[in-house]
Amino acid sequence: MENYEIKQLSDEDFFSMWRKHSREMFKEEQIFRFVEFMPSDEKEDLQKLKKNMGKLINVNFCAYHRGKLVGWSWGYQESAEAFYMCNSAVFPEHRRKGLYSLLLEKMIKEVSSLGFQRIYSRHNLTNNSVLIPKLKAGFVITTMEVSDIFGSLVHLTYYKNKIRNKMLDYRVGMIKPDKEIKTLLKFD
């Protein structure tokens, strides 16, 4: 990754950058930006609700090549245990070089160090350029969703705690209950 650098940005700096570039990065996707079509009173209500959420944690990373922005990854705290990786992008000329995997590695490390137990993301079902690196990094498929905004999505979840990964394997039938699982579930 010679000449590449990943930096963590403040919310102010990150969202200034993101507003400037995100529409261009996702112009080919059929995203229903529902807020643009809401009546003004509903927009006001939404803003009031956002203010009531308090100050949750955001994590914002940007990737640079020779000082020029080439990608990003950001997300936010959803609950006391869950962090939602909301959006990532790598400019087309910098794809397939391992940059997304590097951003992902940085995100997992930072979010895990903050104490979150679960990191999840949502992706179009055919977005293999994101799905494959996430699966290789230890994420697992946990949910399917049909969204009015994005269409058909798959949720990928990374569990920090290895016993939760083992329990998930048991719950989906990948493994039989061993002594540890039987103890945790209080089998007779």
Image (cartoon, rainbow, N blue to C red):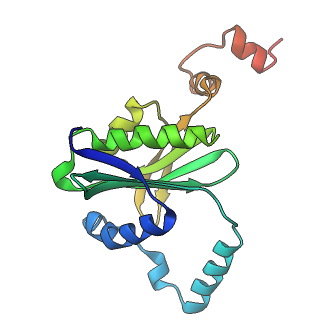
Q: Is residue 34 above or below residue 152?
A: below
Q: Is residue 139 left or right of residue 165?
A: left
Quarter of the rendering occupied by the N terminus = top left
Instruction: Find residue 167 and report its horizontal and vertical position in percent.
Output: 64, 24
Q: Residue furthest left?
A: 93
The answer to whether residue 124 of the structure is visible from this angle is no
Residue at (57%, 15%) from the top-left corner?
175
As rendered, which of 187 and 20 lies closer to the eye? 20
As rendered, which of 29 and 15 lies closer to the eye? 15
As rendered, which of 82 and 16 lies closer to the eye? 16
Residue at (36%, 68%) from the top-left corner?
17
Residue at (61%, 80%) from the top-left corner?
47
As rendered, which of 149 and 115 lies closer to the eye? 115
Instruction: Find residue 21 and report its horizontal and vertical position in percent.
Output: 30, 68
Q: Is residue 88 left or right of residue 51?
A: left
Instruction: Find residue 105 and report its horizontal and vertical position in percent.
Output: 42, 37
Q: Residue furthest bottom?
A: 40
The answer to whether residue 4 of the structure is visible from this angle is yes
